[in-house]
Amino acid sequence: MNEVRLFGLERSVYTRIARLALEEKGVPYVLEEVEIFDPDGVPAVHWLRHPFGRIPVLDDGGFELYETSAITRYVDEAFTGPSLQPGDIHVRARMNQIIGMLDAYAYRPMVWGVFVQRCCPPSTGGVAAEDAVADSLLTANTCLLALDRLAGFDPFLLGEKISLADLHAFPMLRYLSLAAEGRDLLAGYPRIQAWLERLCRHPSVLRTRGRYELAGQSAVAGSEDDPGTRGSFALGEK
């Protein structure tokens, strides 16, 4: 069997999404940390893997793939194990809609606008940008409302059976839940909150917990989605 390697960062939301897919399929893999926010910049060798210098990148015996959604679908289809995608075309389309919604509208406000703003500045003696937190909470609430409407009516969508939608949503909502305002927001969506609490005890989630989650708080900043936010505490992903 070819060795599977995942290039990324333990603290990265999108690296974790890819790891969760590998874990769910029972695929042995090696996580190789690539510090793309090093003061010297992205390691030269990583530019050969990803033309935009981001993470994660999957290497399956020489077949390299970047973009998290492409990676998770490949993992689900290339390896044996429980299917992470529903067979019904309408339900699968809904799953993909949830993933797209999370990427386009939820990731930035939940992770950067709430979690990073609330948890990072205090750890370094700074002050959160309160306007950014307030604006992000409004958008995060809209995302949770949309997620609540889209999900939960089928076992593949935030239900008892794990799907790619679950794996995509969990790391974002988990970081949101580490901020006090995020926990308060989630309390208004009991179905999503119960799902999040259940997944926190799920084996693949327990095996991929990062340092910030284990500590119950975090100090992270900078994303590969927006080079202008790069800083000493970097998630660096997608």
Image (cartoon, rainbow, N blue to C red):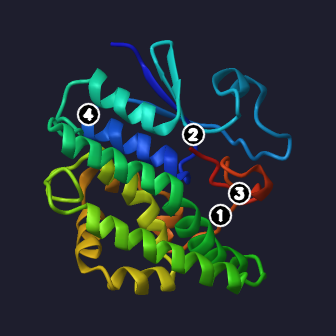
Three-letter amino acid code at disc 2? Gly
Above/below status of 183 relative to 198? below
Label 2 or label 3, whichever comes before in sequence order = 2
- Of circles 3 and 4, the one toward us is 3
The answer to whether mark 3 and mark 1 are in CB contact below 8 A is yes
**Measuring 15% from the left and 61% from the top, which residue is drawn there?**
153
x 71%, y 52%: residue: 226
Point 50% across, 44% down: residue: 15
Kind of residue sitting beneath label 4: Gly
The mark nearer the N terminus, 3 or 4, is: 4
Q: Where on the picture, by quarter, is residue 209?
A: bottom left
The amino acid beneath tag 3 is Gly
Per the image, the residue denoted by label 2 is 8
Q: Which numbered dot is residue 26?
A: 4
Asked whether residue 8 is in view, the answer is yes
Residue picked out by circle 1: 220
| Residue wearing tag 3 | 222
